[in-house]
Amino acid sequence: MPQMYSFTHRIFLIIAIVLLLQACGGGGGGTLPSTQRPVVNPVTEPIESGATVVDPARGGFAEQPEDPEGFALLVASFETAEYAGMQGLALINASSAYARGADGSGVSLGIIDSGVYAQHLEFADGLGNKVTLVGSDYGGGNQRSNDALSHGTMVAGVLAANRDDRNQGSFNMHGVAYNADIHVYEIPLQPSDGPYDPVGLTDLDFGTDNYFASRFAAMTDEVDIINMSFGFSGLVTDYSASAIQSRLGNSLDALRQSHRPLGSRAIFVVSAGNGFGSRDQFGNEIDASSPELLSGLPHLFPELQPHMLAVAAVDSSGGIASYSNHCGVAASFCLAAPGGGDADADGSFAHSEVIWSTNSPPEDAPQGNHYYGGSIGTSFAAPMVSGSLALLKQLFPSVGNYELVNRLLVTANKSGIYADSSIYGQGLLDLNAATRPVGNLGSPASNHLDAGLIAPNINSINIVGDALGDAVQASLSQQNIALFDQLGFPFYQSASTMVKTAAPTVASINFSHGSQITADGHKLLLGIGQNPWRQDFRPLGNPNQQVQEDYIALQFHSPYGSERFAGLNTNPGWFFGLYGNSVLSPSATDDDSSFAAPWLRFARRGWSSGGAIAIGSQNKLRMGLFNGRASWDRYQPQEKLQGHGAMLEYSLGYPGSNLHSLSVQTGFVREQNSFLGTSIGPALGSLGQAETLFVGLNGHVQIDKRWQALLALYSGSTYTGAVNSHIFAVDSQIRSGSWALGFKGRSLWRVNDQLNLYLTQPLRVKSGRAALKLATGRTWDRQVIYQDISLELQPPGREHRLELGYHLPTRIAQRQAWFSATSQYIQQPSHSPINPQHLVVKLMFSISID
């Protein structure tokens, strides 16, 4: 069997003060010289024992498709002295991964190495015993000793040494995936000293093949990520695929794992080798432009590339370490990570130039669980990558293992010097980039991610108005929806973000309603937006954008009681009931359509036309047609939703009497690709045509000479028809309604003064449900997981609006003047019990200047 070499150049040992390290994860102390090894004298400071571990608060990763506000501070909170102690985490931006919730919890890492000193406080304290022995080849001529365990113990520390959040000790450190567990298979390793001697094919005999095949297979049965910081000397390009296949066929089969699905094959992370600058037995410098044989196997056998990585080392400057093999022919499956090195090329190794990690006690030193060592080599670059894979495995447990490998390669830093793939392969390991979405997030186009992604904005539920309130949002708020980045990795956010509302603001806009009745009884209505720069401030939208288009409405009365009317950008309801009988004008209430059939809002921006015929001397029959775009009220931005319909009204009581009126109304509103102002993005399908049939009562009564009472009561049923969607479904019938009550007083305290009181409930769904299939995750084979969610369409709250206004005409300096005071109180706006209540008070004064 050939000798197996650990890829380590030099190991420096330190010993901490035993009495000061009870249950502590790291420490400083004196130095312990060892024979044949140079010593680095560290600064030694005792640390306190029993310090409280503080884990900075952070949101769950599932709720962070985008970094939260204050993310930089959260990142900085992880960059403690312990974080800096290993001298490698900062270079790979590990703190960004920690801030996103990654720490390796729930992941078991495998190492095939010289063994692990499991009693070390970085493995035994805090989370409990984290090292599991899978197998051991010590015995006979290879006795298990502390010195033998040294290399594997240091590798294990880089992988997963505990984080205890103490900052006092000079040798505090923690591993990349500090909360991960470790499964180890112990094999004897030889130091890579002496002349460089490539392994010969005759050394790769049947026994060697079976030996490695069984160890590889044993570990793939235990874990998903296996670190191998050892290898055979000899450049991979010096061997042919046929020769290696004939010599290591069983080992290759164990590495291939063909009996497993691609997504569940274990990942092997292998050190590229420390051959650069080495010389052979004749004094010739060897070619180390590519990895050595074991780490370079995917070059000869491409089927290994999806789940096998070669790792080159960079020093503390970020440049390739002077000893490290380059990526070369392995560029497509190779990347670089910190391994320490003589960054300043001064021939010595400063404290900051080596990788510090856990170590076993030297044979000639007191036994203890507190030893640490500093070293350099691709042996320590490899566990940087393996630990990073553990972080990704924790964050993305449903993703196939080969995709984790690909993610590290794709997101590696390829800028500047790292663009040279012959040296750095796919670049420098970057955990910040690896734990962020790659490209834009999207929704799955089908049941399989390979079908592609679609933009989330076409996967939305769009709501105009308040009929549904926040019912849909409330139903979805308890669910997370999975969005996927361009590599197919899931990032989660609240499903309520699918809902896009265009709810009206409650603040008034300076929009002028004008009404004029001619001598022959004709009525003209005009709505004109004033100079946009003079409009009132609105908390939603652009205050300098006119929302309601100018409108015009004409209503002609004949001497015989008949009518003709037409309007542009006018609510069709203004020609019916209290508005049509001139008992009420649109300007009477802040919501200019409070006493009209509410479904007419879904065709407000368009044309309307109709007329009336007299039936006897007291009654009228009105009819009208309309077609337009949806708009909840005059504050509502334009919508693309189209609606059309017809309305019929039988009005009792001749309008000229002003004593009373009662209108019985019925009609229909047909919405295109929507229901009650609700539409869905094309990715969810299409809703087809919905038709609302409604009935209502609308009228007033003169209580006495001063007071009038007004009433409007409406109820409707919306029939949704066919829904062309396999994702969204809605009840075939949805019931909704609204009501309004008002009192108007005139000449109460002063001649022609006016007091108005209105109490209204806008359109609200009374009953109805919908169902939605949400993408909630994925499987390792890239199948999208969907979950059926029931949506309640009846809002949990009930909006009530109370408006009170007083208007006083007067004369000032022989000119007509008006004083007005109005207030509006809104309870549970948009039918939501969680929305804050609103109170608006206005005082206005105007005077005639002509």
Image (tube, helix red, strand yellow):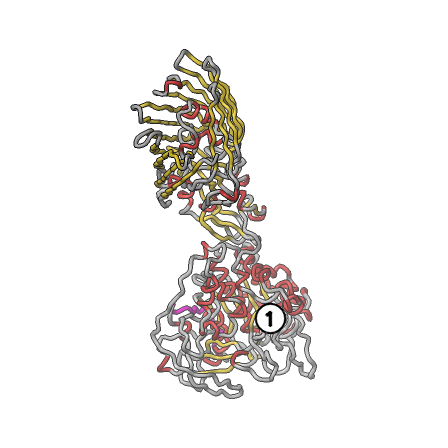
Q: Nearer the viewer, residue 163 or 167?
A: 167
Whole-percent x and y of residue 555? 49, 22
The residue lying furthest to the front in this view is 813
Q: Nearer the viewer, residue 4 or 622?
A: 622
Query: Is 249 a magenta residue?
Result: no
Q: What stretch is highlighted in magenta?
A: 127-140
Whole-percent x and y of residue 654? 39, 17
Residue at image point 51% right, 27% down: 553
Helix, strand or loop for disc 1:
strand
Residue 794 falls left or right of residue 216: left
Q: Is residue 498 above or below residue 310?
A: above
Residue 591 falls left or right of residue 626: left
Q: Nearer the viewer, residue 498 or 761?
A: 761
Quadrant of the image containing the N terminus: bottom right
Count of numbered marks: 1
Whole-percent x and y of residue 675? 47, 33
Residue at image point 63% right, 70% down: 293
Q: In this view, does 734 lie above or below 384?
A: above
Q: In this view, does 118 lie above or below 841?
A: below
Using the rendered view, name the quadrant where residue 474 is placed. top left
Residue 781 seen in render: no
Whole-percent x and y of residue 187? 51, 73
Dot 1, crowdedness within 10 Å: few (<14), some or many (≥20)?
Answer: many
Q: What residue type is labelled 1?
A: Ala
Q: Is residue 166 above or below residue 793?
A: below
Residue corresponding to mark 1: 312
Residue 465 seen in render: yes
